[in-house]
């Protein structure tokens, strides 16, 4: 494996583009190169940059002033590369692994069209299986009962480990009984979870595990090598241990792998990234010369970053000397002096008070840079280490009158406005407990604390609520809505003006309105069929603290956390709260990545494991400082609060560099260092900035009523029938996987349309190969095919007796597509069979139902009949063929007409 260290701003992407050009010139087709990076955005940027480079070379003969040149002998290869660009593999790590798995899916017992399950969905599935295991294990005779009894309610802490499963291929446990109990319960729950996924669902971590199986097989590796010749991996410092093993095995199997990254920027430990993977590559691989010219930073900032990395590396804080090569400014930035400012707030006041003054001071410095130096507020960003810091910054910028944009805040699904909606939906189905209390204080009820307490304390809360008639009527309205479609209930809560003539969104500021709109769009993309599913999903996502706000629109200073800023840059960057230390949350169970061992909080090894995990977090904290300090191009303004003369966190690092609060003050054009004694700052009680008060558009309150049926709808779906043949399900679109009855119906209909016979083994094996059979195991397939053969035999027995032989028909149209526009809906479907014998036309529909119930198909047949009449101008006799019973039922035209009239009446109401 070839490895290159590239510090911030030194042109990693440019080096990758040049490597692409070099490979293409040497005869490697673009289609044989896999470009892999950390995010979709980065992958898209790399594709655009490679495309731009190909264009420059082909149109002008050189790229980047001659760093790459084109000869006429090379032109055909680059023209071919430009044609292949859209289909080239330039994707994320998971995107690459998914593409590779699809190449060899059958050999891994996977459906080639497997669906990638979202992590939140995977977590929900695992939680269900874990609860099932714990419920079953509560029985005294169960094999897991001793483990369940030993752990008691603590067994549910296994859910914490699910998000860490990419840290190790398999979990292990020392001899401590609690550790062993955790491991046994984990293995049981995870085994059930794996069975639940089957061959058609893969969450991200399971993609990695299947990829590991793939790269350990010489046969499958050979298949990959026939597709790819080389893998280029960007941001390699951010891979997790399982991903690292995959790339190492690819290299060991003969597929060339080249990686580039910066261990100084490995800051995603909470996403299971492990810098040790990169370090292992540095030790074992071929180390290429590092990139040492920064085109991002002005001269002063470059000198500061070199000194910072030298200090941190010398102390073993975050990275070592071999990971921190000195860089020099290049390009236009080498001609800019730049500016560094350090401001300290010191005193004996509480740290919250010190930080409030620090935030005001930072706002003043941004104002000065705008007024005196001409920097636009849109070219500024302020980074905070914590989400709490962003709230303090918002208050300070608001008080200073500076425009700002909160790029990413904490806990989108835990925001008050979204929890309001959650509790309102919950109250509609179960008006009690926390949800009822929250709803009583929400905009829908607006009760005082005393009034809400009286309702909650009553033996019959709803009876007490009737003392507030308007509020009770709103409750009744919500109750009626939640009995219907979840998406419509959510729309009602948000948009319906039933709060004294106001809508819920009218009680929200612009930030909250954007969050509510985003939730509505998210739910509408994949509407749940059941309210309980939606509530469970919202509750699960509310627990995930890293699910942030939707980016706020507008202009001004960008406010975001350091983690969110990685990969970005601005002319002016402020870094707030240098004195904050790394927070180590309490944990009940710890997984050590080095050996995959579980450690219960009561076990002997827990203290040592916790110490190791905290040490890793401290190391990552130093790397986070480097990421923050390397974001600006021209000006870096850093502020920190120090209480009682004891600097902590990043302030301690700067103090070691003699740039702390006790250092000599400076006030030069290129360098400012000032210490400010604490002065009380008045709190701001105003609401965050809202949109300018513009005149509403005349159509702002217009409402568009939904049509009774979708724009395109199948008549066979109008009344759900489990025996109806289904199109192949797509879980990404929210459909359920086909059940056994629907699968039998699909296979029988297809076999009849093809003229296949039950006694022909070739025909039966063709049915086994149909995609609808993929979710079923072999034994289940055998059972299904036996049932299909019986139904086909029944159909064949009808031919020549109750049904005319196919050969005796003058015209015969199996599986006839139809589309019938009617009002606002186009009814679209497949007519099983239309044929003519002499002058008589017949429309047939085959049913595999267990019971003979023709009335439920009247509307479907009526639509088919109307379509035939409109297109062919004939009126066929219409009949249902119930194959299980070998019974044919003819349906008169007048009965079908009544079914259409009933539909038309329903649509008007």
Image: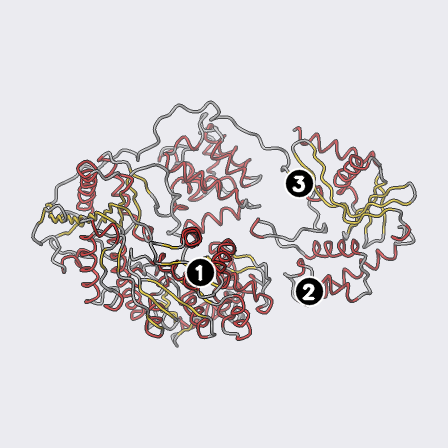
Disc 1 to disc 3, C-alpha distance: 41 Å
- Quick check: can you spot residue 801? yes
Residue 674 falls left or right of residue 634: left
Q: Give the camera-side residue of 370 and 798.
A: 370
Residue 208 in the image: state x and y as whole percent.
Answer: 47, 65
Residue 478 falls left or right of residue 333: right
Residue 137 falls left or right of residue 788: left
Residue 376 in the image: state x and y as whole percent.
Answer: 26, 38
Q: Give the camera-side residue of 151 and 572.
A: 572
Q: Nearer the viewer, mark 2 or mark 3?
A: 3
Q: Where, by quadrant of the figure, is residue 677 drawn?
A: top left
Q: Residue at x 49, y 46 (%)?
A: 535
Disc 2 to disc 1, C-alpha distance: 41 Å
566 lies above or below 704: below
Q: Give the camera-side residue of 97 and 464.
A: 97
Q: Residue at x 46, y 25 (%)?
A: 501
Residue 462 in the image: state x and y as whole percent.
Answer: 48, 36
| Secondary structure category for the residue under label 1 | strand
Q: Residue at x 85, y 48 (%)?
A: 888
User: Do the residues bearing badges 2 and 1 touch, measured as CB atoms within 8 Å?
Assistant: no
524 lies above or below 778: above
């Amino acid at each position: 494996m070839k490895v290159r260290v590239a510090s911030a701003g030194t042109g990693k992407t440019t080096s990758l583009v040049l490597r692409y050009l070099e490979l293409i010139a040497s005869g490697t087709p673009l289609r044989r190169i896999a470009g892999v990076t950390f995010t979709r955005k980065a992958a898209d940027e790399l594709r655009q940059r490679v495309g731009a480079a190909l264009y420059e070379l082909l149109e002008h003969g050189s790229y980047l002033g001659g760093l790459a040149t084109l000869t006429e002998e090379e032109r055909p290869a680059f023209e071919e590369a430009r044609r292949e660009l859209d289909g080239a593999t330039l994707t994320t790590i998971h995107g690459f692994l998914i593409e590779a798995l699809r190449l060899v899916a059958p050999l891994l017992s996977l459906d080639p069209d497997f669906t990638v399950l979202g992590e939140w969905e995977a977590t929900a599935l695992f939680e269900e299986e874990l609860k099932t295991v714990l419920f079953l294990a509560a029985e005294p005779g169960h094999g897991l009962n001793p483990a369940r009894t030993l752990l008691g309610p603590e067994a549910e802490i296994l859910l914490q480990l699910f998000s860490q499963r990419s840290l190790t291929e398999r979990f292990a446990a020392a001899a401590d009984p609690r550790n062993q109990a955790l491991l046994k319960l984990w293995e049981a729950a995870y085994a059930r979870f794996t069975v639940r996924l089957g061959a058609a669902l893969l969450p991200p971590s399971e993609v990695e595990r299947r990829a590991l199986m793939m790269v350990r097989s010489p046969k499958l590796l050979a298949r990959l090598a026939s597709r790819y010749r080389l893998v280029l991996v960007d941001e390699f410092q951010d891979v997790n241990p399982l991903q690292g093993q995959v790339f190492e095995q690819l290299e060991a199997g003969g597929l060339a792998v080249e990686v580039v990254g910066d261990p100084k920027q490995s800051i995603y430990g909470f996403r299971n990234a492990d810098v040790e993977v990169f370090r292992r590559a540095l030790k074992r691989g071929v180390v290429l010369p590092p990139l040492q010219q920064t085109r991002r930073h002005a001269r002063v900032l470059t000198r500061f970053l070199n000194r910072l990395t030298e200090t941190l590396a010398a102390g073993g804080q975050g990275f070592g000397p071999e990971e921190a090569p000195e860089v020099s400014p290049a390009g236009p930035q080498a001609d800019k002096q730049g500016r560094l400012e350090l401001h300290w707030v010191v005193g004996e006041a509480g740290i919250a008070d010190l930080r409030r003054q620090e935030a005001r001071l930072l706002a003043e410095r941004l104002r000065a840079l705008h007024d005196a130096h001409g920097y636009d507020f849109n070219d500024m960003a302020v980074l905070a280490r914590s989400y709490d810091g962003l709230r303090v910054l918002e208050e300070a910028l608001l008080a200073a009158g500076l425009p700002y944009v909160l790029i990413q805040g904490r806990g989108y699904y835990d925001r008050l406005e979204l929890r309001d909606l959650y509790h309102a939906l919950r109250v509609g189905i179960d008006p009690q407990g926390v949800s009822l209390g929250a709803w009583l204080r929400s905009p829908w009820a607006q009760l005082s604390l005393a009034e809400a307490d009286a309702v909650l304390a009553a033996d019959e809360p709803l009876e007490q609520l009737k003392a507030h008639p308007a509020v009770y009527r709103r409750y009744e309205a919500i109750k009626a809505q939640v009995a219907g479609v979840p998406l419509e209930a959510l729309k009602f809560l948000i948009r319906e003006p039933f709060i004294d003539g106001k809508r819920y969104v009218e009680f929200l500021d612009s930030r909250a309105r954007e969050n509510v709109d985003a939730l509505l769009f998210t739910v509408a993309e994949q509407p749940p069929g059941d309210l309980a599913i939606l509530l469970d999903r919202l509750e699960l996502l509310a627990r995930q603290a890293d699910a942030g706000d939707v980016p706020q629109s507008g202009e001004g200073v960008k406010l975001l956390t350091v983690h969110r800023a990685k990969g970005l840059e601005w002319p002016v960057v402020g870094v707030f709260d240098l004195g904050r230390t790394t927070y180590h949350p309490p944990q009940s169970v710890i997984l050590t990545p080095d050996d995959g061992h579980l450690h219960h909080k009561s076990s002997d090894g827990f203290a040592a494991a916790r110490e190791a995990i905290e040490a890793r977090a401290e190391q990552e904290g130093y790397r986070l400082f480097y990421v923050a300090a390397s974001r600006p191009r021209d000006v870096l303004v850093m502020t920190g609060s120090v209480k009682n003369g004891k600097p902590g966190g990043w302030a301690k690092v700067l103090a070691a560099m003699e740039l702390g609060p006790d250092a000599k003050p400076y006030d030069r054009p290129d360098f400012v260092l000032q210490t400010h004694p604490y002065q009380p700052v008045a709190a701001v009680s105003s609401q965050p900035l809202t949109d300018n008060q513009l005149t509403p558009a005349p159509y702002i309150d217009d409402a568009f009523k939904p049509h009774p049926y979708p724009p395109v709808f199948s008549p066979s779906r109008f009344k759900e029938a489990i025996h109806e043949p289904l199109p192949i399900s797509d879980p990404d679109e929210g459909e359920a996987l086909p059940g056994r009855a629907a699968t039998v119906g699909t296979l029988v209909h297809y076999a009849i349309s093809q003229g296949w016979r039950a006694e022909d083994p070739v025909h039966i094996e063709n049915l086994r190969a149909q995609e609808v059979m993929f979710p079923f195991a072999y034994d289940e397939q055998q059972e299904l095919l036996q049932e299909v053969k019986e139904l086909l035999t029944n159909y064949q027995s009808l031919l020549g007796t109750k049904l005319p032989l196919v050969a005796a028909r003058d015209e015969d149209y199996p599986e006839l597509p139809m589309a019938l526009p009617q009002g606002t809906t186009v009814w679209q479907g497949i007519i099983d069979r239309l044929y003519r014998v002499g002058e008589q036309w017949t429309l047939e529909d085959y049913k595999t139902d267990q019971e003979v119930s023709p009335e439920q198909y009247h509307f479907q047949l009526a639509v088919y009949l109307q379509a035939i009449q409109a297109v062919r101008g004939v009126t066929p006799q219409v009949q249902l063929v119930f194959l299980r019973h070998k019974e044919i039922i003819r349906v008169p035209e007048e009965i079908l007409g009544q079914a259409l009239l009933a539909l038309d009446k329903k649509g008007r109401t």
